[in-house]
Image (cartoon, rainbow, N blue to C red):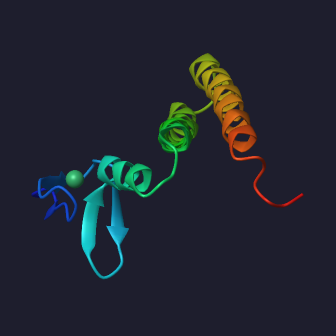
Amino acid sequence: MALGKWKCVLCGDDVIEGQRFFYIPGRGYAHAECVYERLADKGYSREIVALMDANEVLAYAIVRLKEAARIAGKGSVADEITSVRKEVEGLAARLEKVLVDLVGGLGED
Ligand SMILES: [Zn+2]
């Protein structure tokens, strides 16, 4: 089965299935990196965009590690994968704190 492929509406290059992408309503698909770059151009600080990007990578790792542990079943391998996942969750929390501090809170206070 061929991989899905679309043109990025921001840079014009191919967006290939498996790459991180966004769907922009009314326009089409775009690479996540192109969206972040555009956000930065529109005034979001590059630091905020970088933190959103970094958090997304860690969030994806957490999802995959949960799935990997499920596949491993019960035993020491699954336990080790779960232990690594908890460390990644801690790393994600570190960056989330940096992000929240940087923007002065998320408004729920
Ligand atoms: Zn692009």
Would you identify the image quadrant in which residue 29 lies? Answer: bottom left
Q: Residue at x 65, y 26 (%)?
A: 91
Which image quadrant for residue 100?
Answer: top right
Please state the horizontal and vertical placement of residue 89, each as a whole percent of the image. Answer: 67, 32
Q: Position of residue 4 (x, y in %)?
A: 16, 61
Q: Image quadrant for the N terminus? A: bottom left
Q: Residue at x 49, y 44 (%)?
A: 49
Residue 62 in the image: above or below residue 41: above
Instruction: Name the residue nearer the viewer: 31 or 18.
Output: 31
Q: Nearer the viewer, residue 54 or 104?
A: 104
Residue visible at 75% across and 39% down?
101
Position of 92 relative to 15 (above/below)? above
Residue 94 place in picture, x, y as percent: 70, 29
Pick out the residue farthest to the bottom: 26
Q: Tell me if 105 is positioned left or right of 95 in this view.
A: right
Question: Is 4 or 14 nearer to us in this picture?
Answer: 14
